Amino acid sequence: MAPPALKHQLQSPFLRHRLPGWRPTIPHIRYPVTFGLYQEGENLGLFLAPTDLASVRRTLDLPHDDQALVLEGAQILDDAFLVAPEPTRLVRWAEIDALEGEIDVVHLPAHMRMDPDEIQVPTPVLACPELAVPTELDSRVALGLNDSCHVVVISPEPTLIRRCLRGFILDYLKCAVLQDIQMPDLPDALVEAVAQPLPAGTWHELMLHVGPRYWTLDIHRNGTDPDPVQWVCEGAGGHWRGGWSW
């Protein structure tokens, strides 16, 4: 049984999911940890796996009392464009944690007062990510959950995207180490370096290697890059660096 301080980690998507046939570098992380960031018109699209809406909401750190437009299913209009289906509903932003299945969520501010059926956005949000965030309603982000563990985070705000990516990487590190220790912080410069839009079809895979004297985090292009971006730290209580200079 895990120590009490780690019980919440056992519910983490990094530990819940398993991909048969995949060989992990960390035995209890049984699903490849990947992300991809792409330019989607004026928006950025950050694709994360494995994760869930609860994890993403926490890393975005938006006000709990903001609202979420929940879109379930999809509807095709004239075989060309996807619009908000029935049913749509508004819930508090903090309530999206429990949502499961194939579902989209669009952030809205707490002060917004509008019939949800009058809010037109593409669904699934991946059908037209450049239009997924209704900024005219002061929306900041749209989320799409697919296959129970893939989430796309769409936003015109680079700061919000970087915050989400930082949280995703930190969550992976905590679950990979699975110890009640002080986790080294991630310097802004390191996160910024990997938070750049990629060419279509390109993505990154994270692989942590824990040694007795230091840790290395390899960030492989498409999971097969023989010369990955490598971050190094002294382990618990240390400092992440972009390489071996100390």
Image (cartoon, rainbow, N blue to C red):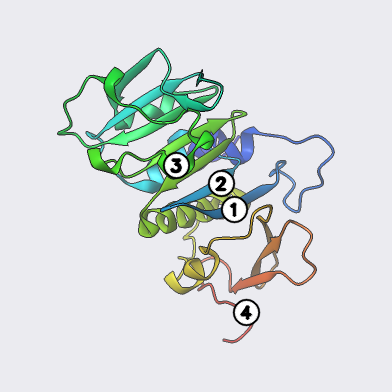
Disc number for residue 36: 1
Disc 3 crowd, CA 10 A, few/some/many (<14, 14-19, 20+): many
Q: First in sequence: mark 3 or mark 4? A: 3
Q: First in sequence: mark 4 or mark 2? A: 2
Disc number for residue 56: 3
Disc 4 crowd, CA 10 A, few/some/many (<14, 14-19, 20+): few
| Residue type, mark 2 in image | Phe
| Residue type, mark 1 in image | Gly
| Residue type, mark 3 in image | Val
Residue 5 in view (yes/no): no
The quarter of the picture where the N terminus appears is top right
Kindly state the secondary structure of the residue where label 4 is placed.
Answer: loop
Residue 205, compared with residue 226, is above or below; it is above
| Residue type, mark 4 in image | Gly
Question: Could you tell me how far apart the alpha carbons at marks 3 and 1 are, in whole angstroms?
Answer: 15 Å
Q: Position of residue 109 (x, y in %)?
A: 22, 37
Q: Quadrant of residue 137?
A: top left
Q: First in sequence: mark 3 or mark 1? A: 1
Q: Where is mark 2, residue-wise?
A: 47
Residue 102 in view (yes/no): yes
